[in-house]
Image: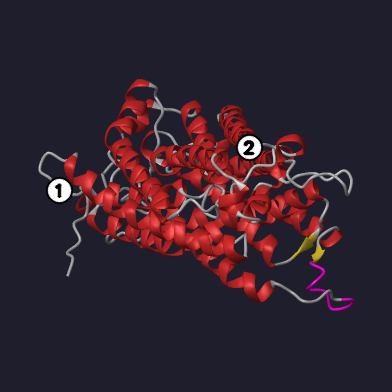
Amino acid sequence: MVNIRSIRLIVPLTIVQIVFLIIFGLKIEYHETAKAVDTVKPSTASGLYPMFQDVHVMIYIGFGFLMTFLKRYGYSAVSFNLLLAAFCAQWAIIVRAAISGNWGVGVMEMLTADFAAATILISFGAVLGKTGPLQLLIMAFIEVVLAQVNEHIGLHYLHTADVGESMFIHAFGAYFGLAVARVLYDEEVEKSRKEGAVYHSDLFAMIGTIFLWLYWPSFNGGAVEGDQQHRAFINTYLSLLACTVTSFIVSSLVDKRGRFDMVHIQNATLAGGVAVGTSAHMPIQPWGAMLLGTIAGLISVLGYKYLTPALSSKLKLHDTCGVHNLHGMPGVLAAIGGAVAAAMSSKETWGDSLYSIFTAMEPTMQNSTMSANVTEVMGRSAMAQGGYQMAALAVTLAIAIVGGAITGFILKIPFLDSPKEDTIFDDGVSWNVAEEGYPGSGDLPLNGKSYPEKHQEDTQIPML
């Protein structure tokens, strides 16, 4: 007998996947460097693929395992992460092709598809455990479109720089997810005893942290080349180092007993990668990258300690993974850092890279007799470019918050089967789970049956 809940998910998912297949069959083709006939050479695939591979690991292992900290939601966290990423990557390829008019697929398109998936996975963190799989897919379907439109506006109309996508991915994904979470707020979430970690679930989450931490330089530098890519690697590396040390320091300082908090170490240590994202390819100097990382570690830990509880109690904004502290505030910091760097830039200190980073600052020559030093007249000034960088942040936040709120109201449709009461933060709703080692709280049937007595309290698993 077919379960109604499964039909609600499987039927629309099947239809959408068939539509994807049809669109790919009718429109999508290989990139011109990958065609078997009339191939354009040379191909950049061999140079780009290592970057794509690193980002791929971040998306499917890093993000997936980072969200396994919930004691009863590990299956869903890592597996819905896989489903959402695969779904979003296909949809992003189609949406980006429709916007740009370029229907070819190469390694760069694979990389940008993974970037698009990252946006949705960040939003997933804000509503983790509080939404059903169908709700997540609908959220992803809408958000991919809005995120790509926002990025197109920022890059092609405002002509801003955001190499590590701290504005267009991290800030957008965080505030979109927070807006959805606010609209979907349910007081039952605050009462749930399942929103918590056990020893081994925090260890699994640290696996995600380490993978993200190791590969973040590729995330920030993968889309550029030459000296810009080299700087992106260096700046991201240094920012992460400073952020990690700062996170440990502040985590200990805010604890009454001077101990470290695993939530801080799992998340705040990564904030440096976000904070330097916008300016990663700019010559901000090593100390500048470290300063951004230091500030990011500070605000992230303080956010987890003080701001997240306040948002939940005062504004009824429940942020499961604390994406506001890892992606939201550091993303805003990155945007500010990029704007300051742009405002302070000059041809003398940045060289020719100034015009490759900020294309709108390049002088426009109207005739051969015009002086080459006409940036103030024909191109943007440094201060103006800084203003446009901040304008891109404002547009990003506006689209993310408004779009997220509207999406949240759509997700409240009863048919979409939002988790309620005992089904919040629980794998048992969507998965067949093993009875041994599954932390039970005695208030939900396991695989359709009542919990046996031995599962009335959280299972204690001996760690060897």
Circle 1 packing at 10 Å, graded few (<14), some (14-19), many (20+), is few
Residue 243 among magenta residues = no
Q: What residue sits right under mark 1 in the picture? A: 259
Residue depicted at x 35% and y 61%: 434
What's drawn in magenta, residue-wise? 31-38
- Seen from the viewer's position, the closer of residues 373 and 162 is 373
Q: Where residue 115 appears, x then y in whole percent?
A: 59, 54
Residue depicted at x 32% and y 48%: 450
Question: Which mark's residue is nearer the viewer, 1 or 2?
Answer: 2
Q: Where 13 sits versus 143, above or below?
A: below
Q: Where residue 60 appears, x then y in whole percent?
A: 50, 61
Q: Is residue 163 visible?
A: no
The numbered dot on residue 154 is: none
Residue depicted at x 48% and y 50%: 284
For the residue labelled by badge 2, is the local secondary structure a helix, a strand or a loop? Answer: helix
Query: Is 355 on the left or on the right of 29, as rendered?
Result: left
Q: What residue sits right under mark 2 in the picture? A: 385
Q: Where residue 304 appears, x then y in whole percent?
A: 31, 38
Q: Is residue 296 visible?
A: yes
Q: Quadrant of residue 370?
A: top right
- Seen from the viewer's position, the closer of residues 115 and 393 is 393
- Which part of the image, by quadrant, shows the C terminus? bottom left
Q: CA distance from mark 1 to mark 2?
A: 44 Å
- Seen from the viewer's position, the closer of residues 401 and 441 is 401
Q: Quadrant of residue 313?
A: top left
Query: Is 103 on the left or on the right of 459, as rendered?
Result: right
Query: Is 393 on the left or on the right of 426, as rendered?
Result: right
Most frequent secondary structure within the magenta stretch: loop
Q: Where 296 sits versus 200, above or below?
A: above
